[in-house]
Image (cartoon, helix red, strand yellow):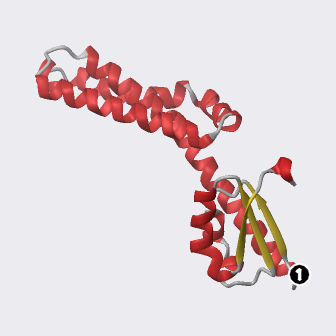
Amino acid sequence: VYDITRDPFALGLVGLVAFLPAIGLALVTGHVADKFDRRSILLVCYALTILAATGLFACAWSGTRQVWPIYALTLLFGATRAFANPAGRALRRRREILATMIDHVCGSTSAARILTLGCGHLREAEMSQAVRAGRVDRFLALDRDPDSLRVVREKYGPVGVETAVSTVSEL
C-alpha cells in the first residue's frame, strides 16, 4: 500500500482494517461458535482465508495501482480470523473438558466404564492421562463412520478402547 500511495496513513489503515472485524464482530462470533458446528465454521474460515491470501497475492503479482482491493481483502482476512478464533478455542476447550472428566471418572472408581457417542477420532483421549495409562476398565467408542473408528482402533486399541459402528437411534 505504501508503494502505491506513498502515504504512511494509508499503510496504517491496512492494520486497522485487519483489526476492526475482531472488535465489530466480537458479540456475533461467539454466538456463531456456540450455535453452529465449529469444525464447519473453521473450514469456511480457512477457505475464505486462502481466498483472501490468493487475492492479495494476485494484487501484488499484477502490480495493481489501486488500494481498495487490498483493503477489501484485508477486511475479509480480518473477518475470517474473527470467526475462526472463538470456534477454534471452543473446540480445544471441549477436548480439555472431556479429557478432564475421563480422568476424574477413572480416578474416582476402580472400574471406570466410559461410553462415547459420535466419537470421531476420539481426540480428547490424547489429553487423558487415564486413557494413555490404560486405567479405564472399559471404554467403548461408537460412531457411524467406519473410517473414524479405524483411526480410533489403531491409535487407542492398544490401551483398551473398543469400537463399534452404531448411532444413537440404534442404541
Q: Quadrant of residue 138?
A: bottom right
- Is residue 88 depicted above or below 128 in this figure? above
Q: Where is residue 50 in the image (x, y as percent from the top left)?
A: 35, 35
39, 164: nearer the viewer:
164
Residue 1 can be seen, yes or no: no
Image quarter of the N terminus: top left
Which residue corresponds to the image point at 82% horizontal and 80% vertical from the top-left? 107
Residue 22 can be seen, yes or no: yes
Which residue corresponds to the image point at 45% horizontal and 26% vertical from the top-left? 20
Q: Position of residue 85 (x, y in %)?
A: 53, 42
Q: In which quarter of the image is residue 52?
A: top left
Residue position for label 1 = 109
Q: Quadrant of residue 141?
A: bottom right
Which residue corresponds to the image point at 81% horizontal and 65% vertical from the top-left? 115
In this rendering, position of residue 47 left or right of residue 42: left
Q: Where is residue 117 in the image (x, y as percent from the top left)?
A: 77, 56
- How many C-alpha atoms fall within 10 Å of the one at disc 1: few (<14), some, or many (≥20)? few
129, 145: nearer the viewer:
145
Q: Position of residue 96 (x, y in %)?
A: 67, 62
